[in-house]
Image (cartoon, helix red, strand yellow):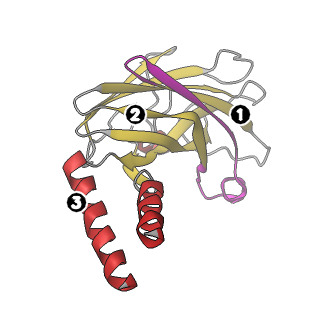
Amino acid sequence: MKKLLSISAFLMCISGVQAATTLYETQFHQTSINADSNFLDGASVTLSNPSTSLSGNLAANLLVPNVQMQNNNAGWTVTFSFTATQDIILSSLDLGFQFVTGTGTRHGNTDPKTGTATVTLTAGDSSATADLSFERVQADKDGTPTADIQQASFNTPVTVKAGETFTLTVNAKAPNTGGTFLGLSQLALQGDAVPEPATASLSLLGLAALLLRRRV
């Protein structure tokens, strides 16, 4: 009897535990964004404050809002929109940040550049935020155009139902940088796919049978 109780307790503990996985990732090419994911569809991007982006040189393979960051305390805002194709739980994200000149080239100097970004995730009545800090990395200073890729967890996981549209709004600021523009190089979303009830039940039953067999 004790064996059966211990197995039941074990199954209850693991039934809600899944390893976080990458649900979506993309490399930016100006405002082009792909939806090559088994979990998301209908990807789009909207620029506000400003509404245009740079397109020359390195900026062709980045998303660089067309606004100077120096002394710009408001920064820029970009909103991404996605539709979930199945129930998912979003828990964290990766964002790549890269500083460029007004013509989209790498800065020739080696001065430090830093900034911060707040990402707001909204799905229906649920919302969460994630804060990131970034800088100009050493490789970029040395002459190789390179982004600083940062990861952050949302302050609370957000569940998105199949067919539901959610948004990611990024507000980035770097007011203490001289004569520079700031771009995004890539985006990745991490979390868990929510299994169908029938699939989860079958998995637990199979595991229970295996454990019982090993204990006989």
Q: Residue at x 52, y 43 (%)?
A: 92
Residue that label 1 marks: 115
* Residue picked out by circle 3: 202
- Look at label 3 and name its amino acid: Leu
Quadrant where the C terminus sits is bottom left
Work out whether residue 203 or residue 60 is closer to the camera in this orientation and state it: 203
Q: Is residue 40 magenta?
A: no
Q: Position of residue 106 (x, y in %)?
A: 61, 46
Q: Residue at x 29, y 42 (%)?
A: 34
Q: Label 2, on which residue?
A: 159
Image quarter of residue 177: top right
The reply to whether residue 196 is in sight is no
- Report the magenta residues as a range: 122-149
Q: Nearer the viewer, mark 3 or mark 1?
A: 3
Residue visible at 75% across and 29% down in the picture = 178
Q: Quadrant of the N terminus?
A: bottom left
Looking at numbered disc 2 in the image, what kind of residue is underneath it? Thr
Can residue 146 be spotted in the picture? yes
Q: Residue at x 22, y 60 (%)?
A: 202
Measured Cα–Cα span from mark 2 to mark 3: 23 Å
